[in-house]
Image (tube, rainbow, N blue to C red):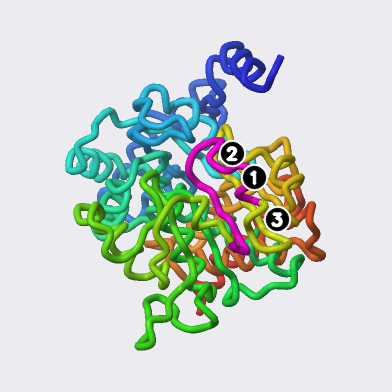
Amino acid sequence: MDVFEQSLQLHESHHGKIAMQSKVPLKNHSDLSLAYTPGVAEPCRRIAANPQDLYRYTMKSNSVAVITDGSSVLGLGDIGAAAGLPVMEGKCLLFKEFANIDAFPVCIDTRDTEEFISVVKKITVPYGGINLEDIAAPRCFEIEERLKKELTIPVFHDDQHGTAIVALAALINALKVTGRTIGACKIAMSGAGAAGTSIAKLLMKHGAANGGQGHARKDAQGHGPNIILCDRHGTIFEGREDLAGNPAKMQLAQETNPERIKGSLADAMKGADVFIGVSSGNLVTPEMVKSMAPKAIVFAMANPEPEIMPDLAKAAGAAVVGTGRSDFPNQINNVLAFPGIFRGALDIRAKAITEEMCFAAALALSACVKEPSTEKIVPDIFDAGVTEAVADAVRKCESR
């Protein structure tokens, strides 16, 4: 059987992947009187008098809600809240196994932004953090921004920031392997949605620029980050008329592609040192990889089918290849980031997960690989200490 058939059998045989487990014994009437009535009245009274005691007496201190509307699930697209539940269950499993965080799937069946935000705000009482998942752009940007402003617990859209953290960590080490600096690289990207936007912004923070000039925006000489993003209509550049209704892409157009390169993904990849794909399968051909600079870096991260299969990219001349899949080396997967991010945030009772925390997490992840090579630019999630390294980086941000 292939991996899809095996996975289907696993889900069917267990009726999902997660279940509730009790933390306290319930063997007799004494246990019952402590866990439930009459004893439970006392923590209720304490919380009523001081709402912060929720963290002391309930699951809130170690719980996360994994919330989706099912509008952008993996590379499958808008398959709905119900069909997205297996992914949310999987996410909860990863939270527990890698960070000992109790996570709960919440699938909200609406495409109305205001309704979605309202529902999330009303259900946050039991949770110490919110992990948004598989919500289509550009709605995801507004949803996250609003919830960050209106809630006092961490809100993290993993498709944006988790992907960006791991991609930057991988790129830091791939650049070491190929002898490059990020400021001198031409970077072509496929996908300008949630993940692509966040990756581009984090790369800019790390110094992706045109000849070392510029940073977040073009300078007086017109230099800017030498990142060229592509969506399904081609390269994104300042002045592209169809971007008028998309503020997120309009901002990207102003901050990237300083030469205003127009055309297709193939045009963007010509001479590029780095390709990063967070779009859909089979968009990149071996010929497109061959058109890149020598010792090219190719991160084809679409799931379940990458933009180009790793073996084809290698055969076409790529020196370092990363993928979103677990059955090839260099899996660039969010699971390397989000368990540690939330572990650290919950431990310090952070009110938000900041850009500084994300950047620190990427640096910590890259440092987990002591001697980067073409076959190992990111740690394996099963390597000892990965989650704790990320969590510690987050905790230290709060103390500075």
Decide: is 332 above or below 220.
Answer: above
Question: Where on the picture, by quarter, is residue 361?
Answer: bottom right
Question: Where on the picture, by quarter, is residue 27?
Answer: top right
Q: Earlier in the sequence, mark 2 or mark 3?
A: 2
Give yes or no for contact between labels 1 and 2 (Cβ–Cβ under 8 Å): yes
Residue where numbered disc 1 is placed: 323
Quadrant where the N terminus sits is top right
Q: CA distance from mark 1 to mark 2?
A: 7 Å
Q: Nearer the viewer, mark 2 or mark 3?
A: 2
* Mark seen at residue 44: none
Q: Secondary structure at mark 2?
A: loop
Q: CA distance from mark 2 to mark 3?
A: 18 Å
Q: Nearer the viewer, mark 1 or mark 3?
A: 1
340 left or right of 236 in image: right
Q: Residue at x 52, y 59 (%)?
A: 188
Give how far across and how far down residue 207 sits, in percent.
53, 76
Q: Residue at x 36, y 42 (%)?
A: 126
Q: Nearer the viewer, residue 42 or 173?
A: 173
* Mark seen at residue 306: 2
Q: Residue at x 38, y 38 (%)?
A: 67
Farthest residue in the bottom direction? 220
Give yes or no for contact between labels 2 and 3 (Cβ–Cβ under 8 Å): no
Q: Residue at x 41, y 68 (%)?
A: 256
Q: CA distance from mark 1 to mark 3?
A: 11 Å
Q: Secondary structure at mark 1?
A: strand
One can see residue 51 in this view: no
Task: Decide whether residue 60 is among the magenta residues.
Answer: no
Give how far across and how far down residue 125 sits, in percent.
31, 44
Which amino acid is tagged 1? Thr
Which amino acid is tagged 3? Val
* Range of residues picked out in magenta: 271-289
* Mark seen at residue 378: 3
